[in-house]
Amino acid sequence: MTQFDVLTIGNAIVDIISRCEDRFLEENAIVKGAMNLIDAERATKLYDMMGPAVEASGGSAGNTAAGIASFGGKAAYFGKVAEDQLGTIFAHDIRAQGVHYRTMAKGTEPPTARCMIFVTDDSERSMNTYLGACVEFGPEDVEPEVVAEAKVTYFEGYLWDPPRAKQAIVECARIAHEHGREMSMTLSDSFCVHRYRAEFLDLMRSGTVDIVFANRQEALALYETEDFELALDQIAKDCKLAAVTMSEDGAMIVKGSERIHVPATAIAELVDTTGAGDLFASGFLYGYTQGRSLEDCGKLGCLAAGLVIQQIGPRPLASLKDAAAEAGLA
């Protein structure tokens, strides 16, 4: 019996979420709907200009780990913070969710990563990320026994920005496959795909990655096409299993010649799309590691995504285990 269902690896980030007008994005050259990497000086400037804000521990893979734990799954997380206030907040929050987290903090410089998220009236989020201590994550932070004891190890494409993290991921893949486990990744966002398209394809085609998560825009960017069906056909050839989300159109699960469409969960109000893809992955991977059908995995993913976009913040405020039971998916 394995100790963990899913190990997630990512940039340990504290999200600072505030509402703004589209004009604010234009005036400050913020690319709407994307993750914009920024330096310390710009991070300070944007923070000073923010309106009332909510601080919440985030980071894509951290959100996924929290979601898996909320479903009742056994989750672990690797990610680097500094010995500062935000680092303490991050470590407390993820452990309080029931996630195994032992990555050592490293000094006070660079400080813990933070992401200024501006949410516009259409509920779209524009992220401005200062990676800070995240760039210090490397092979020495890998806990081999945790990788060996996790059914699936999942990492975010954003990790391809800090260079030493790549070495850590390759080492995790070696350990995971050596122990008969699986590797999974999320493409993170279309701008990330444009930066590392060749490397992502190599990870998939070489068998380093078994399961891929993407949204429609990322899948199109990966294959440099406007033909979604073509992108689905190609991703089916390049990896063992893929889950492609399509916002209000639900998700498409792709395995070989098999195609499973899962409708989106009906919502009362769209509040904030932050964390939608992360929580879809949590529901899907929770179901997958429990041996559920691919259709059920997709339904659990859509359920989690549908709940998180009806709240402010990227981590579930209510029990996903209870929500799954209420939806007949327990």
Image (cartoon, rainbow, N blue to C red):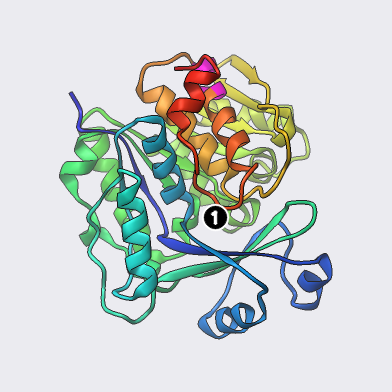
Give the percent coordinates (x, y) of residue 265. Answer: 66, 27
Q: Residue furthest right?
A: 23
Q: Is residue 218 visible?
A: yes
Dominant secondary structure (helix, strand or loop) of the stretch shown in magenta: helix
- On the image, which quarter does residue 277 sit in? top right
The verdict on residue 85 being magenta is no
Give the percent coordinates (x, y) of residue 96. Answer: 32, 50
| 95 to the left or right of 273 | left
The verdict on residue 297 being magenta is yes
Determine whether 213 is above or below 196 in the image. above
Determine whether 108 is above or below 157 in the image. below
Q: Which sits in the foreground, 170 or 116?
A: 116
Q: Which sits in the foreground, 93 or 167?
A: 93
Secondary structure of the residue carrying tag 1 is helix
Q: Which residue appears at 73% of the width and 29% of the height?
A: 249
Q: Which residue is mark 1?
A: 196
Q: What kind of residue is marked 1?
A: Tyr
- Which residues, given as a range, are shown in magenta? 294-299
- On the image, which quarter does residue 26 sit in? bottom right
Quarter occupied by the N terminus: top left
| 117 to the left or right of 81 | right
Determine whether 251 is above or below 112 in the image. above
Q: Which sits in the foreground, 329 or 5?
A: 329
